[in-house]
Amino acid sequence: MARISKLNIDEWDPELRELSRADSATPLEQGLTRMFAHSPEVAKGLMAFAGRLKIHRELPERMVELVRLRVAFHNQCRSCMAIRYKDAIEDGLTEDLVCSLEKPMEADNLSDAEKIAIKYGELMATNHLSADDAIYEELKKHFTEKQVVELGMTIAFFVGFGRLAATWHMTEELPEAFQELGTETISPWGEDSIEVR
């Protein structure tokens, strides 16, 4: 059971509803916005930031999704792990690739760029101060500085809001494997998932 109540769409600020395209979204696609709606002005600012990250993205959707799912594993955010975004699937994300996230540095179906992006995300989620000069040198072999900044900001978003979502326990609409809230560590690989827009 979620720890913060989910507001019904008719209780949302009209501008927030329009910004989130909530009228055409499923409850799961409305996601955390149902909780953010308690503070609509702050939520609108967050949506503007998240929207700009998405609209102006140079990084491949497939890679961003792989990073997001590996961060979600470290955050133990069940809703984050259960979801697969449609644009990433259209960019080549498969469940075989998701399964590679169990041991991404050993995976032969991930590019070197994907591996270092995943490693960077993992460090940011587990021990951010270990993201040292060597990590940034490796990132710059595959990405422009603009892309490294974009990746860092995207990862920061995933780490912070994934941790928040994990503590809110929004699991009711997820596949059964993601609903139980015990202390057992779960993963996004090898489980049912849900495609969202």
Image (cartoon, rainbow, N blue to C red):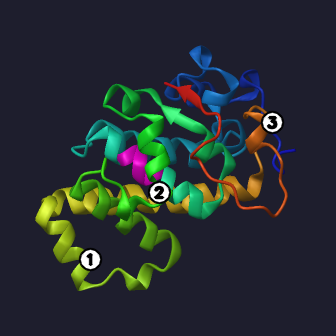
Q: Amino acid at mark 3?
A: Glu
Q: Secondary structure at mark 2?
A: helix
Q: CA distance from mark 1 to mark 2?
A: 19 Å
Is 129 contained in the magenta span? no
**Contact (Cβ within 8 Å) of mark 2 with mark 3:** no
Q: Position of residue 49 (x, y in %)?
A: 41, 47
Question: Which one is earlier in the sequence, the residue at label 1 or at label 2?
Answer: 1
Who comes first in sequence, dot 1 or dot 3? 1
Residue 142 picture location, percent across and down: 15, 60
Which mark is on residue 157?
Answer: 2
Image coordinates for residue 57, horizontal then vertical, percent = 27, 43
The circle drawn on residue 135 is: 1
> Marks 1 and 2: CB-CB under 8 Å?
no
Quadrant of the rendering where the N terminus is positioned: top right
Residue 6 shown left or right of residue 106 in the figure = right
The residue stretch that appears in magenta:
64-68
Considering only vertical position in the picture, is 51 above or below 165?
above
- Residue at 62% of width from left, 40% of height from top? 82
Most foreground residue, 187 or 108: 108
Which of the two discs, 2 and 3, sits closer to the camera?
3
Label 1: which secondary element: helix
Q: Which residue is mark 3?
A: 172
Residue 34 falls in image quadrant:
top right
Q: Main secondary structure of the magenta part?
A: helix
- Nearest to viewer (mark 1 / mark 3): 1
